[in-house]
Image: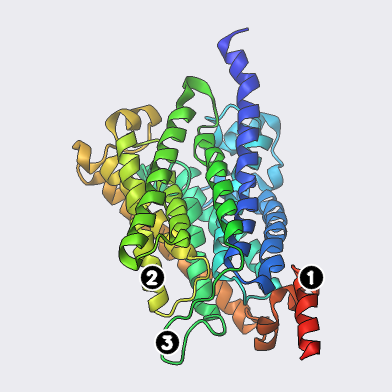
């Protein structure tokens, strides 16, 4: 059997497994966010991931995939709705994905998993006080009007891709978008009841299960091996292994750097900051994993962990209640990761991938860094404006936030009529009766 025939058999299965790994990140987000929030909201926070993935699956199939990768203009795709394309026209309608030698159905499944991650990130800013109806409507509109447009700009033949923007697996396309959406949401919703004192000093509202959060982050770490290496969409030449290497080195560096920073500044090796360091490093290396040398991936990951530590503290002190630090972890780290290729992109890897130019530290000048800056600013402005308009209109119509009474009771009961921990509810009721 010829090599090309073998790849024809192996590559589709590889992409399918990679898609499953990325989809499994929904489990990681469920555990991370449920563990990082209070017991009375645990079932709601985890359950919304199922609802979200269902909404994204339908909306991305109907509109999102076509807008992202369909034939159109430099702003958006205008064809390929609901994947209704004759077999003979697939590579023409979805020319931006013609390089990947796998069936259209698998290209869709893989890209769907990315869109689902982006909205899962956004939900961190909604946590513990948003209406379920807001999740449903915003999720549908984000997957139709926001995420696909930036995806098209960078990956679908749009203007940023034409400039040579380097974002291999989505520090900007996936993570910065989700982080900005989370920031806009948390600002429009306002802080949770009891988060700040009257003089606006932050109170600690600890999550109910740190072990859940740790397991969630480990699942996300594993899932990222579908995210970054999977974006090669082929086993040819084994380049996916190199991408896995830089991804893992960066992540390890981010975990250690964030832990030692917390240890130095706070006097304790805080686990939450360590977990944020893991995720921030994963986010940062997502753009650059195919463009940088291993030593640079360690630097990128370590700086991501340090930057996230300080920015998460800063935003809380500024009165922003972001329950899982979604903007610091995914937004700020997404910006750093996207800009990092402008400094560290290696000439040999740029030549191999065929995207952009070498970075500043390799004699490439400021050109690639400028392209990355333009990409970050352009994406940030579009996402912030459109998300603000959507959420503001929702706030003025159906409302974004549950009532104070419902928030105090907990969203498990007020939104779903069932407590995530029924035994604890029964125990609390018995104690109140005894009193």
Q: To which residue does mark 3 refer?
A: 200
Mark found first going from the N terminus, 3 or 1 = 3
- At a point 54% along the width and 85% down the height, the residue shown is 194
Q: Which sits in the foreground, 130 or 374?
A: 130
Q: Which sits in the foreground, 68 or 6?
A: 6
Note whether residue 383 is visible.
no
Dot 3: few (<14), some (14–19), or many (≥20) neighbours within 10 Å? few
Q: Helix, strand or loop at disc 2? A: helix
Mark found first going from the N terminus, 2 or 3 = 3
Q: Position of residue 363 (x, y in %)?
A: 18, 37
> Where residue 423 is drawn, which disc sits there?
1
Give the image quarter of residue 266: bottom left
Dot 2: few (<14), some (14–19), or many (≥20) neighbours within 10 Å? few
Q: Helix, strand or loop at disc 1? A: helix
Mark 2–mark 3 distance (CA, rounded to whole Å) = 14 Å
> Where residue 188 is drawn, which disc sits there?
none
Mark 3–mark 1 distance (CA, rounded to whole Å) = 35 Å
Could you tell me if the residues under marks 2 and 1 are in contact, i.e. CB atoms within 8 Å?
Answer: no
Vertical placement of residue 217 versus 96, above or below = below
Q: To which residue does mark 2 refer?
A: 313
- At a point 66% along the width and 84% down the height, the residue shown is 408
Note whether residue 359 is visible.
yes
């Amino acid at each position: 059997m010829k090599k090309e025939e073998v790849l024809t058999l192996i590559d589709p299965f590889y992409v399918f497994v990679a898609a499953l790994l990325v989809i499994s990140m929904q489990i990681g987000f469920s555990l991370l966010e449920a563990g990082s929030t209070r017991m009375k909201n645990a079932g709601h926070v985890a359950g919304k991931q199922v609802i979200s993935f269902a909404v994204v699956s339908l909306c991305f199939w109907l509109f999102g995939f076509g807008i992202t990768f369909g034939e159109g203009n430099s702003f958006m795709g205008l064809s390929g709705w609901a994947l209704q394309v004759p077999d003979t026209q697939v590579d023409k309608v979805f020319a931006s994905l013609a390089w990947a030698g796998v069936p259209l159905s698998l290209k869709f499944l893989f890209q769907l998993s990315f869109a689902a991650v982006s909205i899962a990130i956004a939900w961190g800013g909604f946590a513990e006080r948003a209406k379920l109806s807001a999740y449903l409507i915003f999720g549908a509109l984000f997957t139709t009007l926001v995420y696909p447009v930036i995806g098209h700009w960078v990956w679908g033949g749009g203007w940023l891709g034409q400039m040579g923007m380097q974002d291999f697996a989505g520090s900007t396309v996936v993570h910065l978008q989700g982080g900005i959406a989370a920031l806009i949401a948390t600002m429009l919703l306002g802080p949770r009841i009891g988060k700040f004192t009257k003089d606006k000093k932050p109170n600690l509202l600890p999550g109910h299960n740190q072990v859940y959060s740790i397991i969630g982050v480990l699942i996300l770490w594993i899932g990222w091996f579908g995210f970054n290496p999977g974006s090669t969409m082929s086993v040819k030449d084994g380049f996916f292994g190199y991408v896995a290497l830089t991804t893992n080195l960066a992540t390890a560096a981010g975990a250690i750097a964030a832990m030692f920073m917390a240890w130095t500044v706070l006097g304790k090796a805080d686990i939450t900051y360590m977990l944020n360091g893991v995720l921030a490093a994963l986010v940062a290396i997502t753009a650059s994993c195919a463009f940088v040398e291993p030593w640079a991936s360690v630097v990128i990951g370590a700086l991501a962990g340090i930057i996230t530590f300080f920015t998460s503290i800063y935003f809380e002190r500024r009165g922003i209640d972001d329950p899982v630090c979604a903007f610091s972890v995914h937004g700020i780290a997404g910006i750093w990761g996207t800009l990092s290729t402008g400094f560290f992109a290696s000439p040999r890897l740029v030549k191999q991938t065929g995207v952009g130019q070498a970075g500043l530290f390799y004699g490439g000048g400021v050109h690639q860094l400028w392209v990355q800056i333009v990409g970050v600013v352009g994406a940030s402005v579009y996402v912030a404006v459109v998300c603000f308009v959507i959420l503001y209109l929702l706030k003025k119509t159906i409302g974004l936030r549950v009532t104070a009474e419902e928030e105090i009771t907990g969203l498990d009961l007020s939104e779903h009529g069932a407590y995530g921990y029924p035994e604890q509810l029964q125990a609390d009721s018995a104690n109140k009766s005894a009193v």
